[in-house]
Amino acid sequence: MRRELALIAAVLAVATPLAARHAAAIEPLGAGEFNVKAKVDLKSLDRADFIALLTPAAQSEGGSELVFYDFADTLCDLLAKESQSFTAKTGIKVKHVCVDGDTASQQLIAAQAAGSKPPADVFFGPNNDMRALTKAGIVANLPLVALVPEAKDLDREAALRSRGFEHDGTVLPFHRNQTVIAYDSAKIALPPTGLVEIFDYAKAHDLKVAVTNPTKGGSGSGFVESALLALAPECQKDLYDFSLSEDQAKAVAARCMPKIVSFFRERQGLIDYTNGNENSIQEIANGVVGFATVWEDDLYTLAAKGMVPKTVKPMLLASGEVGDGDGLFVLSSTDKVEAALLYVNFLMGDQVQIDKLEQTGSRTARLDLQTAGKIPDRLAVYLVPDQLYHERTRPRINGLISDAAADIFVAQVIAQ
């Protein structure tokens, strides 16, 4: 009897994982059927057998090339080398093409509309274009976030949305960037982490704060968004309402900006407004200011070139600061689904994610990938520690509200 029970238990132990696998079979997003044609049964895939099932089919393509469109000029050389590494490991050829993001998006949409096969299989493109690309049928309705092994533990905000567009996981958050406050540690041993406290500190220590004009640099518009989150928390629900019309967005900005306008007007003597992201970095690098609004990856890249003193470091407000990024997806028109899936998994893997962070300060949305100890110490000081980054990063607000808020800031604060 015991032997029979043991045999039943062993059968159940094997059967249960199989049942769980079929219960968790992937389904197309936003439609009843997948809008791509694959050699394997896509619904049979899961993270556990992803590599084993896809590799034979992908390698059967022989000399056929997977075409990868890459819009990031800062990552172009690096990703070309990474693609060569992928080919060396798998035998799957990749044609890496550097493109302008918006131009490539329009090219893909135009080809689809004309009934022609778009000239790419995988696209790393600007997040702002993901809504239009999806509506045009360019994006494969594959649940990449739920399927790709290297995407098993992603920041949820980054994983399911692209600048407010809810794609539910068809686009992988390949690259992330972050607005930060840079400070000069030679002048500021222990920087305050509150927005009000930073300006109080600057006043008490005869320091200035460089703020990028929000209509001339993303670190400035991001700073205004972060100021809205810090000083007008009652507006947060509206700030993240991406269904608003342009007029409605302008109304939200008009209602929520007075606190921000008053705050900065009262501190005009402490602020040096700059005309670009790099201008703000130059001011703190040259010792003109004690604090500056910057992009973390810009600061990191210039520091790696020896253009920023070792005393300049990044920090994030305790109330949070907005960050953004750009996504990666498989095109619905590809006839190389298996190779494309293997390739996006490779791009989300440790090697590429760490390499791009080390070379350009390009963040990862992977919560399971710790970067501490993997970046040279001389460069790691120009990055916010992982834990603080994940705790304090915030998604960008509605872009229409941000644009209207930036115009108000320029007219009512900078121009005064």
Image (cartoon, rainbow, N blue to C red):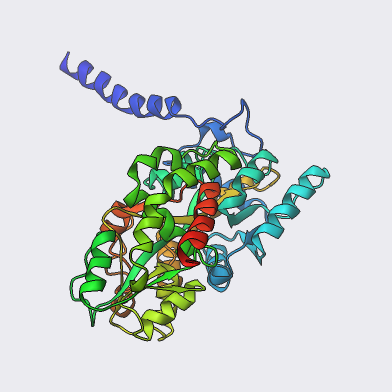
Looking at the image, the residue that sits furthest to the front is 416
Q: Nearer the viewer, residue 198 or 55?
A: 198
Q: Position of residue 175 (x, y in %)?
A: 48, 59
Q: Position of residue 168 (x, y in %)?
A: 50, 37
Asked if one can make out residue 49 in the rendered structure from this viewpoint, the answer is no
Question: Above or below — where is 170 with respect to 415?
Answer: above
Asked if one can make out residue 279 in the rendered structure from this viewpoint, the answer is yes
Looking at the image, the residue that sits furthest to the top is 1
Looking at the image, the residue that sits furthest to the left is 2
Question: Above or below — where is 83 with respect to 62?
Answer: below
Q: Position of residue 388 (x, y in %)?
A: 27, 58
Quadrant for the N terminus in the image: top left
Identified at 49% across, 46% down, the residue is 254
Q: Nearer the viewer, residue 157 or 108?
A: 157
Looking at the image, the residue that sits furthest to the right is 114
Q: Image quarter for residue 295?
A: bottom left
Question: Above or below — where is 99 with respect to 331?
Answer: below
Number of numbered tags placed on the structure image: 0
Q: Nearer the viewer, residue 99 or 285?
A: 285
Identified at 38% across, 47% down, the residue is 155
Q: Image quarter for residue 407?
A: bottom right
Q: Position of residue 172 (x, y in %)?
A: 50, 49
Q: Nearer the viewer, residue 207 or 341?
A: 207
Question: Above or below — where is 292 with respect to 233?
Answer: below
Q: Image check: 118 left or right of 49?
A: right
